Image: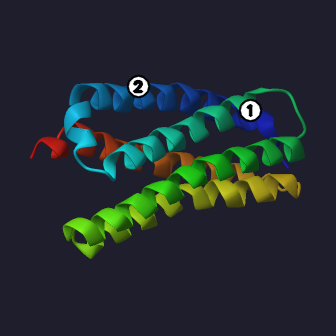
Amino acid sequence: MHGIAEWRDFFGACAGASAALAGLIFVALSVNIARILEFEHLPARAAAAIGALMLILTASLATLAPQPVWALGAEVMGLTVLAWLLQVASALDSRKASLKYGRPTREHVSEIVFGQAQMAPFALGAGLLVAGYDAGFYWLAGGAVTIFILAVVNAWVLLVEILR
């Protein structure tokens, strides 16, 4: 067991990067808000994207606080549930939009799959930390990388694809 100390630099970098990407999504929202509001599923998608980045930010900050690993795991699990609820709301709105506007099924299914793919590593990692396994940090790291990749995709959709 190596513990939290070996992960502090990684999660410190994650905190800064997630805050910057969340800011980019806020800019995308402010620049294109009228167009985004024309599509009833996009506000929930934007909220889910910001929520996922806030999961990285808050989980990363929690790793920097001195506390037992099990307590960190419990905190991350609670934060993951909150972010997951935003993903579920986004998936429901995406499904409604698919039915109402005849959007291709692959679009709505990919939104659901990608949303869940962001949350699953955090839930698993948090569970492992609660159980006392430092392997949970690897799952949190994998979840953070997954969210970073998909946050860039969401920022692209909200900045560029929305204007097509």
Density class for disc 2 (Cα within 10 Å; few <14, some 14-19, many ≥20) is: some
Q: Position of residue 67 (x, y in %)?
A: 88, 33
Please determine whether, in this image, residue 69 is positioned above or below residue 64.
Answer: below
Horizontal side of residue 73 vs 25, given as left or right? right
Quarter occupied by residue 121: bottom right
Q: Amino acid at mark 2?
A: Gly
Which secondary structure lies at badge 1?
helix
2 or 1: tag closer to the N-terminus: 2
Horizontal side of residue 24 vs 54, given as left or right? left
Colour mapping used in the image:
rainbow
Q: Amino acid at mark 1?
A: Ala
Q: Is residue 36 visible?
A: yes
| Picture residue at 25% right of the left edge, 41% below the top | 36
Please determine whether, in this image, residue 105 is positioned above or below residue 60.
Answer: below
Q: Which residue of the protein is positioned furthest toward the left in this rendering?
A: 164
Please determine whether, in this image, residue 102 is positioned above or below residue 133.
Answer: below
Q: Is residue 107 visible?
A: no
Q: Position of residue 51 (x, y in %)?
A: 52, 41
Horizontal side of residue 109 vs 74, given as left or right? left
Distance, label 2 to label 1, CA atoms, is: 20 Å
The residue singled out by tag 2 in the image is 23
Q: Which residue of the protein is positioned furthest toward the bottom in this rendering?
A: 105
Q: Nearer the viewer, mark 2 or mark 1?
A: 2
Q: Position of residue 5 (x, y in %)?
A: 78, 33
Q: Position of residue 56 (x, y in %)?
A: 58, 39
| Picture residue at 55% right of the left edge, 45% below the top | 144
The residue singled out by tag 1 in the image is 62
Q: Which residue of the protein is positioned furthest toward the front in this rendering?
A: 100
Density class for disc 1 (Cα within 10 Å; few <14, some 14-19, many ≥20) is: some
